[in-house]
Amino acid sequence: MSKNINRKSKAQFYQKKKSQTKDFPRFKLYLEYEGTRYSGWQKQPNARTIQGELIKACEKIFGDDFNDLQGSGRTDSGVHALCQVAHLDAKTVLAPEIIKLKLNDLLPHDINILEVEKVGKNFHARHDVKSRSYIYQISRRRTAFGKNFVWWIKDNLDFNAMNSASKLFLGMHDFASFSDDDPEEKSTKVLIESIQLKKEDELILIRIIGSHFIWKMVRRIVGVLVEIGRGKKSENDILYYLKNKSDEPARFTAPPSGLFLEKVYYEDDKIEKEFESLIRIKGFART
């Protein structure tokens, strides 16, 4: 009897919450963060996360009038974002610019709200995403200032071999070999729309644009490309990983420090052809 009452009470609670949500204005948040100190985007018990910090700030600003905050997708522990997107539901008369100022007053120094705008209730930060882009930064020299934002590789890398091999990832493929099992992912098939490599001073930059990305996928693509740059893997290995489930790419997972969520694209958003590094790492010159 008591179990039935509890189920009924829970159902009534969530139904009431759902109906109340219709009355809450929705805001679109653009934000940047350094992920070094955080266990990723998604709120977790007993762990410091980006979403968790944002929710705490929203609860202080809006109190009981705060309803929900959802991001465009997860970023892993230690991964950064140049422009993450979230939506916020809160019953308030505050202007978007004031919400931005109040959030930034409360947030830690390594999370920053870039812009807030009011949007319709039909907008959803995650469900409406068309594409996402990530940038990975590899440093070809040890750096005292950028270690939180690069993967320093001592070996000489064959850039041309990496660039050529990267094109094999274009199109729709099954990336099961490039991800760990994740109960939240229904499919491991991903459409890679673009992959670009370029050199910038002492950096090698890898930019990947796709329909979505599964857990650790970008870091394992980068790791396998680095093995090709080292001459330890070939293009045939990539073809094998894409056609057969293999645990081998897990051994080459690139560290999160060099990875940035660059941008989240929605309907009518323009994808920029050019991209650049977050930091500069110059070569050493004797004077």
Image (spheres, helix red, strand yellow):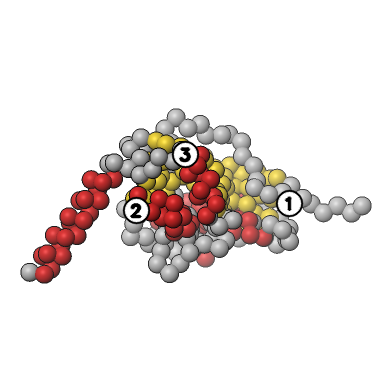
Tally of numbered discs: 3
The N terminus sits in image quarter: bottom left
User: Residue 36's quadrant in the figure?
Assistant: bottom right
| Earlier sequence position, callout 2 versus callout 1 | 2
Whether residue 220 is visible: yes
- Measuring from the top left, give residue 157's x and y in whole percent: 68, 55
Residue pointed to by mark 3: 96
Q: Amino acid at mark 3?
A: Pro
Q: CA distance from mark 1 to mark 3?
A: 37 Å
- Measuring from the top left, give residue 244's x and y in whole percent: 40, 56
| Earlier sequence position, callout 1 versus callout 3 | 3
Q: Amino acid at mark 1?
A: Ile
Whether residue 236 is visible: no
Near mark 1 (Cα within 10 A), the count class, few <14, some 14-19 or many ≥20, is: many
Question: Which of the two discs, 1 and 3, sits closer to the camera?
Answer: 3
Q: Is 50 above or below relative to 134?
A: below
C-beta proximity under 8 Å, tags 3 and 2: no
Q: CA distance from mark 3 to mark 2?
A: 19 Å
> Which of the numbered marks, if any, corresponds to residue 221?
none
SS type, badge 3: helix
Residue pointed to by mark 2: 64
Residue nearer the viewer, 186 or 106: 106
- Measuring from the top left, give residue 240's x and y in whole percent: 46, 55
SS type, badge 1: loop
Question: Which of the two discs, 2 and 1, sits closer to the camera?
Answer: 2
Rendered residue at 44%/30% (across/down): 268
> Which of the numbered marks, if any, corresponds to residue 281?
1
Rendered residue at 47%/32% (across/down): 269
On screen, residue 140 versus residue 105, left or right, reads right
Question: Which of the two discs, 3 and 2, sits closer to the camera?
Answer: 2
